[in-house]
Amino acid sequence: LPDGTTIFERVLPGPDRMYPDTDSAPISIEEELITSIRGRLPLSVQSRMEQLRAWGIPEDTHGYLLRRNLVWIIEKIIADFGLPPKFVGTFFGHHLRHMETRLSPSAEFNDYTIYGLFKFLNGRGLDKEAAKLMLPELYTHPHMVFDSVLTASGFRPYSADDILAYLPNLRQKYSEIKTSKRPEAECDWIMGRLRPIAVGNMPLAELRRHVEKGTGHE
């Protein structure tokens, strides 16, 4: 119309409206439901970064872990198996990442396989360090059963007593060759000889304490 108006008349809410179903009364939502949904929302990137820092996970892994959305599985491994957060985060951020640049898997590698790996070690009573030993074989052959991966990785079972029984002979051997004047040299040399049989069988920190007891550096 000349005055800028139209002859259109807005129909008031009622049965004659074009979309009467939109006149339904709003459905109330309980506060508990809202809280529940909010609790299932993923954490923000900033919150995840703060979590990684609190766990002591190296900064150079953060981008990779966040980009690959691996924090949730790290969190689950820590909670289910009581492993140190720094160890688990570094395992993904350094060791798994290294495998991805060096090896080609024979089938698609699912990150959740790592959860299965730690579950296997926990069930067998093996030390967490065995995961590093097994990772190259596991990454290359993702569908191989864990027992076979363990064997193919060169692992051999030894009791702590079996490992510690080597100490007297190794101390004697080092006293004969004395490769360095460094105070820690003897301990480092012995650890280097025992590490291959200790990995997976006993914590390396515990082994080092036993080694240091006889070297005067405890």
Image (tube, helix red, strand yellow):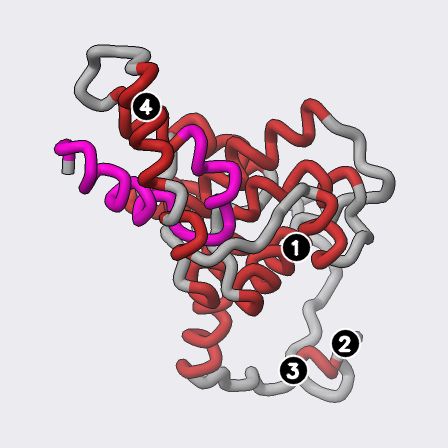
SS of the residue under disc 2? loop
Q: Are marks 1 and 3 in contact (CB under 8 Å)?
A: no
Looking at the rendering, the stretch of residues picked out in magenta corresponds to: 192-217
Side of 43 relative to 95 (left or right): left
Q: Which residue lies at the image location 62% right of the left edge and 56% below the top edge? A: 117
Mark sitting earlier along the chain (1/3): 3
* Front position in the image: 195 or 5: 195
Visible in this render: residue 71?
no
Front label number (4 vs 2):
4
Image coords of residue 91 (percent x, y): 51, 40
Question: Counting other residues with Cα less than 10 Å from the Cα at mark 4, is it few (<14), some (14-19), or many (20 or more)?
Answer: some
Q: Amino acid at mark 3?
A: Asp
User: Which mark sits nearer the N-terminus, 4 or 2?
Assistant: 2
Q: Quadrant of the C terminus?
A: top left
Cα distance in 3D space between marks 3 and 2? 8 Å
Q: Amino acid at mark 4?
A: Tyr
**What residue is disc 3 on?**
23
CA separation in Å, label 4 and label 2: 91 Å
Indicate which disc residue 19 carries. Answer: 2
Q: Is residue 72 visible?
A: yes
Whether residue 38 is situated above or below residue 198 in the rendered picture: below
Label 4: which secondary element: helix
Residue 130: give x, y in percent of width and height. 54, 48
Q: Which mark is residue 112?
A: 1
Instruction: Mark 4 and mark 2 in contact? Answer it, CB < 8 Å.
Output: no
Question: In the picture, residue 140 is in which quadrant?
Answer: top right
Which image quadrant is residue 4 in? top right
Decide whether residue 110 is among the magenta residues. Answer: no
Q: In the image, which disc is placed on residue 174?
A: 4
